[in-house]
């Protein structure tokens, strides 16, 4: 076994979180090695590919935003709704997000990490960590059958929801739950009718129809990702026949029925047994970032954006140079994420399509002030639980009851309970972050 290198940071995983963290840490003057078991370019199809406006601002800070926009033109509109209550939010030409395939995005981030001074070694895996006096002090990595011990002050896991580093250090889960839905999607050639229709082109679309929802994302310049998410019990009926099930669902929905007549450019990707969680994100000599430390329901489309956010925050914590700085990174990550985690859980449940949410979407479609609140939410300036002010929500409930739609009341009670749970958790996390902020 070879050894000899001494570094500041070894990063396991070279995709959205790992390469971005490596770029920021190297720019701060740290000696950084980023390793990844895969080669580049390689695809990562288990991704919505959507980068919101907040994420694009971080890419601009990193100097990569213009390259992303050259491959994937800005997404100006987000269309969302339940049944026939549908809204379209216009972010404007300068404020939109982007949907870019990971086979294009991840190599850009790797190139930027290298340009800023990080060493990147692909087809290289984490085997074990080195420990001394209860602290992680390095990593054992392997390439082409040869192993090397690399000493480092910090080992960072950016290796996804099945993180090897998280397993090795015993990073515990909390607030975890099993996904209530299965999802299936594929890439299609962008047909002429899609680009010619302003209600499709430059739109990210998520429509809740009965107990399912459809996802249509314009990816890169000439492709479209089309997906469907269904309750788990329905997906289990089609075990082993996911492709046929996926195509059947598309043909049954007018909004996407024309896609099977076009050119499908990929196999059907399935996400059937998901689990969403927080993990402890820091310990003596180690930290987790991206999906390795926080994996939430993908329905809101914030996974990549939050990976960029947390990668930058962790690089700043590493620059601070103490375990206290890393613990603060962990606690603040929770404070900034717990409400969205709870909100994503609500969006992902089969019961999201209900009378109260239909009334809420109809109200948003008519009121510019509520549309502005959605934009503020996407800019990470507003809590998801503040999208509909409490007075407006009560008014919507009373209106539904007046119309005889009494099924709105239990959904209102459920929403209040969910908001209460989130608020309680938020206060707890804020208290922890405040205490850690007092550390030197």
Image (cartoon, helix red, strand yellow):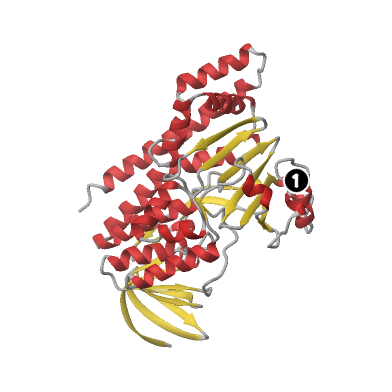
Q: 71 or 419, which is in the foreground?
A: 71
x%, y% of residue 28? 26, 65
Q: Is 353 left or right of 250, judged from the image as shown?
A: left
From the image, tell me which residue sits under label 1.
257
Rendered position, 366 above or below 180:
above
Q: In the image, what residue occupies the spot 52% across and 32% down? A: 418
Rendered position, 401 above or below 175:
above
Q: 155 or 227, which is in the foreground?
A: 227
Residue 386: name its quadrant.
top left
Q: Quadrant of the N terminus?
A: bottom left
Q: Is 221 left or right of 292, judged from the image as shown?
A: right
x%, y% of residue 225? 63, 53
Secondary element at tag 1: loop
Q: In the image, what residue occupies the spot 53% across and 44% down? A: 300
Q: 259 or 193, which is in the foreground?
A: 193
Number of on-image labels: 1
Q: Looking at the image, can residue 297 be seen?
A: yes
Q: Residues within 10 Å of mark 1 (few under 14, many from 20)?
A: some
Q: Residue furthest left?
A: 440
Q: Residue furthest top?
A: 402
x%, y% of residue 417? 52, 29
Residue 11: name its quadrant.
bottom left
Q: Looking at the image, can residue 167 be seen?
A: no
């Amino acid at each position: 076994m070879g050894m000899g290198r001494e570094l500041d940071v070894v990063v396991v995983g070279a995709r959205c979180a790992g390469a971005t963290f490596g770029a920021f840490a190297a720019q701060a003057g740290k000696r950084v090695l980023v390793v990844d078991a895969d080669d580049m370019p390689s695809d990562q199809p288990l991704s919505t590919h959507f980068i919101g406006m907040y994420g694009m601002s971080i890419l601009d800070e990193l100097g990569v935003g213009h390259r992303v926009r050259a491959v994937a033109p800005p997404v100006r509109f987000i269309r969302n709704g339940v049944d026939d209550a549908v809204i379209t939010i216009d972010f404007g030409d300068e404020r939109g997000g982007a949907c870019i395939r990971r086979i294009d995005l991840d190599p850009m981030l790797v190139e930027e990490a290298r340009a800023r001074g990080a060493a990147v070694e692909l087809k290289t895996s984490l085997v074990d960590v080195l420990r001394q006096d209860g602290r992680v002090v390095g990593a054992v990595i392997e390439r082409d059958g040869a192993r090397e011990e690399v000493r480092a002050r910090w080992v960072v896991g950016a290796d996804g929801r099945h993180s090897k580093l998280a397993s090795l250090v015993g990073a515990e889960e909390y607030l975890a739950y099993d996904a209530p839905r299965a999802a299936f999607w594929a890439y299609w050639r962008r047909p002429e009718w899609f680009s010619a229709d302003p209600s499709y082109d430059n739109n990210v679309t998520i429509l809740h129809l009965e107990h399912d929802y459809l996802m249509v994302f314009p990816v890169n310049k000439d492709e479209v990702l089309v997906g469907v998410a269904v309750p788990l019990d329905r997906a289990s009926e089609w075990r082993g026949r996911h492709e046929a099930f996926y195509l059947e669902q598309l043909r049954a929905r007018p909004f996407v029925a024309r896609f099977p007549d076009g050119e499908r450019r990929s196999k059907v990707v399935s996400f059937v047994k998901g689990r969403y969680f927080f993990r402890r994100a820091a310990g003596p000599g180690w930290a987790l970032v991206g999906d390795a430390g926080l994996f939430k329901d993908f329905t809101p489309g914030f996974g990549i954006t939050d990976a960029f956010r947390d990668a930058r925050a962790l690089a700043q914590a590493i620059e601070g140079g103490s375990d206290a700085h890393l613990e603060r990174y962990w606690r603040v990550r929770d404070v900034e994420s717990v409400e969205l985690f709870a909100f994503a859980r609500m969006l992902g449940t089969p019961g999201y399509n209900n009378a109260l949410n239909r009334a809420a979407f109809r109200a948003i479609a008519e009121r510019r002030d509520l549309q502005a609140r959605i934009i503020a939410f996407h800019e990470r300036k507003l809590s998801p639980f503040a999208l509909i002010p409490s007075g407006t929500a009560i008014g919507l409930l009373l209106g539904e009851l007046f119309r005889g739609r009494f099924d709105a009341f239990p959904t209102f009670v459920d929403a209040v309970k969910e908001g209460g749970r989130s608020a309680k958790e938020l206060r707890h996390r804020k208290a922890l972050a405040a205490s850690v902020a007092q550390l030197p």
